[in-house]
Amino acid sequence: MRLKLPIPLYNLMKATSFWRDNYLILREFKNFRKIAILAIIFSLLAAIFEGFTIGLISVFLRSFTNPDTPPLQTGISWFDIWFLGTNASFVGRLYRIGTLVFLTVWLRSSFVYLGNLYIKLSELHLGDGLRKSLFKQFLKLSLSYFAKKRSAELFYSINNEVYQIKIACNVAAAFIAKGFTLIVYVTAMFWLSWQLTVISVLLFSLLTASLSNLVKWVREVSFEISKAGSNFSSVAMEFISGIRTVQAFATEDFERRKFYQACEQVESANTKAAAASSVVQPLTEGVSATILLLIVVVAVTISGENGRLQIASLLTFLFVLLRLGPLVSQINGAWSRLNSFQGSLDNIKSILRTDDKTYLENGRIDFDGLKQAIDFVAVDFGYDAENLVLHNITLTINQGEMTALVGASGAGKTTLVDLIPRFYEPVKGKLLIDGVDLRDLNIKSLRRKLAIVSQDTFIFNTSVKNNIAYGSEDADEAAIIEAAQLANALEFILDMPNGFETQLGDRGVRLSGGQRQRIAIARALLRNPEILILDEATSALDSLSERLIQESLEKLAVGRTVIAIAHRLSTIIRADKVVVLEQGCIVEQGKYQELLEQRGKLWMYHQMQYESGQVS
């Protein structure tokens, strides 16, 4: 059974600015609404039984200090007789009321336990839900978003910032639970003496109002904490990832200064927040003690002058007031802490927002294989609209042929092939596959028929077998071995301590550059793709491995469409078409030998490599 809020209450809640500002976080509660509602119910019951306990203590003290006081009656005869002892002696009545106090105290404790348990469960579910929502958001975003973000910042958000929001959930729940108790205390105090209650409420309200500027300061500092923490994670992760470069260039002192500066920023931001937050509770306690003293003086004055306040009621009122002071202090402290999490909340909300991000709208046509050609029609592209990387690209890549892209670094070769798997959208023009606009194709169905081997090979921290089978989980062992053999990787894999079960470490740290590349090629071969993109796939290989891999790729290319970005021209001599790019424009395209005869850009590159002995 699903628990739902009454529609009028739900609509009222949605209309509030709090809901609008925090909807991206609050929507997660729908996934564990039963747990959240039970947490509220148990916290409310704990507060109610706290009130019952106070009332019974007042009755107990009244009966104890004045035996002639008429017994308390509820009007429910069986309850009055058995539990309040209306027909019992004075001593018997005290025992029964004392027993009730004992029961209500333990019932309250039980509800406090259950409330805290379900609050903790809500906190865990919220953290789990937010992490999954962030991950789903990352999966849907285009690569252009990640190109503008540091990976450490995103990791900090999904880990540290979500943890902060979990703590905020706990603090908010405690704030609500203590709010229930505060209402019960004020109600009990009003029942005991409305005059003293009015004075107490006014004084405590002035205290809360006086803390508003302090709370505002805590809120502002929270943004500094979030920013400093994100920067610290980026600096630390870059240092660890680039430790080889740091040692090679002997820049340890520079990195140490940068790291220490990031540490100091975190410390400074947290010190400011601590200075503001720490003053709330002692200040509240000091003022509360002063208020308590004033109330005692007023209460004694009222009692002494006209006897309107009985000693039992006075003692009970002071008992409640003694508990109210720390409670108000805790509520103000919780409110201050809640504001200290605002930076984390805003960070998570900024990632989960959808109105300021670029998403690739998925097409509805399934891609069942390339039959004719891939056509670029007057395509322009730039990572931002003002700075184009590709200009007026018009190109046909025929099915079953090998098309090679040649050009200097930064010419736009990788950017061009990144448009085929639809990592990015053209700014202008169209990309057609068999005459169908790429935007109309289902992205997953297209990418399942495609494999990419890039110059920046990513190796997962798992076994050799799992790395080769990544994206082809159903492949059997024989197919994995065959792919490794075709990629010229079988020999070095079998020489490893555990063969195909050898763990490769973070980013394949146990492999050489050439070995990482061959694992990636084996991964692509295992997919048996219809379209194969090779982004300088043999650039990290030695001459012998390059020759063997080139032979394997030539066999693989038969009947398939291959787009190869090549630095070494020796690898693309047999290509069906060579396309030369310069500054994002196609300057030449045709057969390799034909372009050499034209003595243009390709001829120039050929001559440079011929002189260095890279081509014959």
Image (cartoon, grey):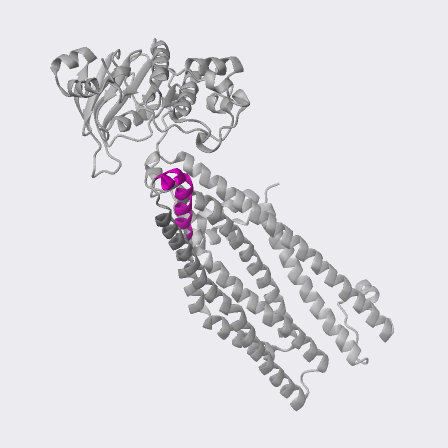
Q: Is residue 591 in sight in this rendering?
A: no
Left or right: residue 110 versus residue 473 is right
Which image quadrant for residue 238? top left
Q: Position of residue 36 (x, y in %)?
A: 58, 49
Q: Which is nearer the eye, 488 or 399?
A: 488
Relative horizontal placement of residue 366, taking residue 91 as reference (left or right): left
> How many numbered marks are there?
0
Q: Position of residue 315 (x, y in %)?
A: 69, 78
Residue 368 in sight: yes
Nearer-the-camera pick, 255 or 218: 255
Q: Residue at x 39, y 38 (%)?
A: 244
Q: Position of residue 531 (x, y in %)?
A: 35, 17
139 vs 466, nearest the viewer: 466
As drawn, 254 above or below 530:
below
Judged from this view, the residue extending furthest toward the bottom is 305
- Predominant SS along the magenta part: helix
Q: Residue at x 16, y 14 (%)?
A: 595
State left or right for residue 346 relative to residue 293: left
Magenta stretch contains residue 243: yes
Please state if 151 lies on the left or on the right of 577 as rendered.
right
- Asked if 491 appears above or below 128 in the picture, the reply is above
Q: Position of residue 599 (x, y in %)?
A: 12, 16
Viewport quadrant of the C terminus: top left
The residue depicted at 55 percent of the width and 76 percent of the height is 286
Q: Which residue corresponds to the image point at 59% horizontal and 42% vertical from the top-left?
A: 2
Q: Is residue 185 magenta?
A: no
- Please provide the residue range marked out in magenta: 229-248
Q: Quadrant of the N terminus?
A: top right
Q: Quadrant of residue 363?
A: top left
